Image: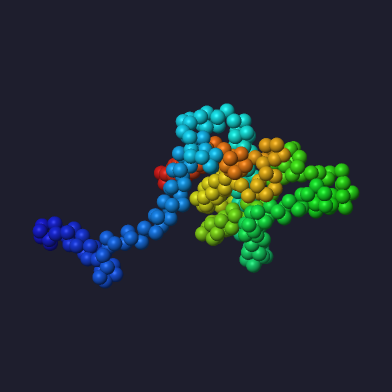
Amino acid sequence: MTTASVSDAPVDARRGSQQHARQSLIPGSNPNKFWIFLVPGLALLTLIIVVPLVWNIYLTFTDYRGIKPPEWVGLENWVKLAGDTVFWTSFGNSIAMILAMVVVPTLLGLLLAAMLFDLIGKKFGGKLASFLRATYYLPQILPGVIAAIVIGWILRPQNGALNDVLEGMGLGGLAHNWLGSPDTALPSIMLIMIWVQLGYPIVIFMAALQRVDPELYEAAELDGANWLQRFTAITVSIIRPEIFVVTLTCTIAALKVFGPIYTLTGGGPGTSTIVPSYYAYSEFFQSQQVGYGATIATALTIVIAAVSVVFLLAQTRLERKEEAI
């Protein structure tokens, strides 16, 4: 091969790829017009997300009650927010929600998914494992408000199913106003959210386990590893990306939880179950402090965005470390 033919090879390759790209398009179509199909989505994004977000940020610097035009007050709402004990109490309750909706469901979901896939699925068949998976996921299908209403009937202080069962068992002394007492309202909400949230990580983790090579489990079992050792060394390491996804999405859901609080307790008794989303709602529609409610909502948005960025950075750093090994 001559020098000229060698130098022309990359040019010919580029021409061939460009010709293939042109042939792969629809005949007679103009590739520069495909951006038109993005216009409806961008328009909806602008109208539903961007415009309300910008308007909400603007309201944080105003005194607005929803009737008269907004009055500019600068950083007054933010200064008030920094010293608002109810606001900080609501974020403290959000940490409890993260424990109930992220930490406990993720850990339990990981264990249950591994047991359903590695133990029950192998010993009793895939149908039983699928049935149990669907049973765990059932609370996710129910609308949050309906599930909260049903739980409210169970936990009613009078004629509630839980108190009736306790009295029928001779444990009437344990009967309690579960949602009306400050010392049990938040733990009751947390137990409800664990029940509601548990099915989501189980489904995600069982789907992720489908890509784990069974030969890894067999080799580890031949080496004498028990189930717990196989779980920690193989299962957790392989499905780590799904663990990050579940943790991030559940954390966002915990920070903006609203339906169960609105339906069951209304943030009470007192402020024992109030969360930022419900606090913003109460300031918007009950106190008619629209500017201050917008400030609470914007602060919550900033926290959610910061948490998302931290999760993504942590996942990226961990993946780079694994690639470097």
Q: Which of the 4 image quarters holds residue 14?
A: bottom left
Q: Which of the 4 image quarters holds residue 296?
A: top right
* Residue lying at 59% horizontally and 30% vertically, measured from the top left: 84
Judge by depth and name the residue closer to the eye, 175 or 283. Answer: 283
Give percent across and percent down for residue 41: 41, 57
Give percent across and percent down for residue 80: 55, 29
* Residue lying at 52% horizontally and 50% vertically, measured from the top left: 245
* Residue lying at 57% horizontally and 28% vertically, measured from the top left: 83
Residue found at the far right of this picture: 170
Give percent across and percent down for residue 70: 48, 38
15 vs 291, left or right, is: left
* Residue lying at 43% horizontally and 55% vertically, measured from the top left: 44
Quarter placement of the C terminus: top left
Judge by depth and name the residue closer to the eye, 128 or 247. Answer: 247
Relative to 228, does residue 38 appear above or below in the rendering? below
Q: Which of the 4 image quarters holds residue 25?
A: bottom left
Relative to 299, does residue 238 appear above or below in the rendering? below
Give percent across and percent down for residue 313: 45, 42
Looking at the rendered structure, the number of numbered marks drawn on it comes to 0
263 vs 62, left or right, is: right
Judge by depth and name the residue closer to the eye, 298 or 224. Answer: 298
